[in-house]
Image: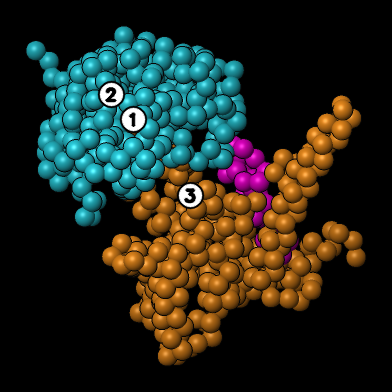
Chain colours: A orange, B cyan
Amino acid sequence: MDLFDILLEPLSYDFMVRAIITTALAAIVCAVLSCWLVLIGWSLMGDAVSHAVLPGVVLAYIVGAPFALGALVFALIAVTLIGVVRNTSRVKEDAAIGIVFTSLFALGLVLISVTPSQTDLNHIIFGNLLGVSIPDLIQVLVLGVVAFTILILKRRDLTLYAFDPTHAHAIGLSPKRLGALLLGLLALTSVVALQTVGVVLVVAMLIIPGATAYLLTDRFSRMLVIAPVISAVCSIAGIYLSYYLDTASGAMVVLTQGAAFAAVYLFSPRQGLIGTRLAKARRKNAVVLAA
Amino acid sequence: MSNPAILVENVTVHYGEVLALDAASLSLDTARICGLVGMNGSGKSTLFKAIMGMIKPDAGRVLINGEPPAKARKAGGIGYVPQSEDVDWQFPLSVRDVVMMGRYGHQGFTRRASKADRAAVDLALDRVELSEFAGRQIGQLSGGQKKRAFMARGIAQGATMMLLDEPFAGVDKRSEATITRLLKELASDGCTILISTHDLHALPQLCDEAVLLMRKVLMHGPPEVVLQPEHLAMAFGLDVLNRDLPGAADPDDGLTAPDPADRQLTDPDLPYRAASKPQGRS
């Protein structure tokens, strides 16, 4: 079996084609968003929001509303609760985030346990890449394209917000509204990625690509290209690996992204561990030689 | 007659229980350079935020050219140069990217740069002598170049008023001279400039006027008058050294600054940092 066959064989199954399209799309949208999240320092917020949407998704399932609507409502509830706990008690922000998102996540699990037709909902937790139906695909497609388009159109404002909110305010923009926009997109993107890797691992797709790209470039505009490319390639590679190794697909996608980060962390020309160590050693040698 | 460029009237601001500004009043005419002097926690940053409209005062009002600050912000009139600690220097942006952010207020929904925007950025970079560093990541600049990059952002913006937070901190003598010259040029073009600084020795050459702040405006006048030791003593809380008070009367008391007047001129903040209140953050 040559490489061509290896790549083509899984594509003879419809479910694999749907899995690959869904994953690539989710990987790209998450990766674009992750560029801002890692620079603002919102990784924990990404973790929180992506978990906290679970009860919203379950309730939406129960009443037959769109998942995205439930997710948005609960993302909003989570962020509001975190703000209230932080501002009105001596509890620090990280603790507030930890309390709120785990409680909401637990609420989601309880709701799942009392809802008939549990199998469907259990897929939300760990993802069900290989069971993506056509309506699922359409939902991911619509939400993904909406989130992606807004992110790209508003990328300069979002970067300004991440870099210098005071200047944003000084020139008449509203940092508050830009922050809210980013949080809303975070909730939307979480729903997109739920299908692929599940609630538990969404946060990986929301952090790893941005962090990886950040180690490779000094230009934000390039991060916005590098992150989605790496993320898409890793995710598709992860699906192929899971197909041939017969492993959990969502987990494999995240594992591949983690491996890519590790490689960049070690071997990135400027920021990589090995590169910077070598440069240091060279400088030392140069000093010794000169002396 | 014309309105003052900046008018602060009886502005009071609290952060929770802490009183940050206490009925502070200040009027600054167009094209003047004003140095804002006070120790940490004296309300310098709070006054800046009030002028920019980032915080709503509990009492009093701020007018920019006779209008509410929101109007001046929309018109792109307010330029802001942050202090170094408030900037993420690792952020993956080039000097040109940062200066271009000054143009965002003039651009459309997606902030796509037009030819005019690019020309304004080039001109601003040229003016602060950073053209050759335009492609550098902002963290790769020296202390003085970093300040100039943010000044270029204000210039590209077309700001008629510039607020600079500690522009001389971490800046070498040569860059300091460049920044001073640049600020004077901007003022002669009609830009009103308000500088908060610890660097008292740079003030007389640079500023047309100086303001002493200690939660309220204690004094406002020509720098050589305001910076006299007995006046500085008010703002830096040295009145505790008054001979009538215990502690200061004892020359062996280790807490007493040896020569307050001399010392504050070089670094007013250092010996008294312990006494300063934590600065509020929004």
The residue positioned 36% from the left and 53% from the top of the image is A180
Is residue B21 positioned above or below B226 on the image? below
The chain identifier of the residue carrying mark 2 reads B
Q: Look at label 3 and name its amino acid.
A: Ile
Residues under numbered marks 1 and 3 in contact, where contact means CB atoms less than 8 Å apart: no
User: Secondary structure under badge 2?
Assistant: helix
Image coordinates of residue A84 in percent, x first then y, are 30, 65
Question: Could you tell me how far apart the alpha carbons at marks 1 and 3 are, in whole angstroms?
Answer: 43 Å
Q: Does the magenta stretch include residue B217?
A: no
Q: Can you identify the residue that label 2 sits on?
A: B229
Q: In this view, does A114 lie above or below B79?
A: below
Q: Which of marks 2 and 1 is nearer the N terminus?
A: 2
* Residue drawn 57% across the image and 34% down it: B139
Image point 46% across, 89% down: which residue?
Answer: A113
Most prominent secondary structure in the magenta stretch? helix
Residues in magenta, as a range? A213-238
The residue tagged 1 is: B260
Q: Position of residue A242 (x, y in %)?
A: 74, 71
In the image, taking residue B78 as reference, residue B217 lies left or right, namely left
Residue identified by numbered label 3: A40
Label 1 sits on what residue type?
A: Pro
- Whether residue B264 sits left or right of residue B148 in the image: it is left
Q: Nearer the viewer, residue B140 or A157?
A: B140
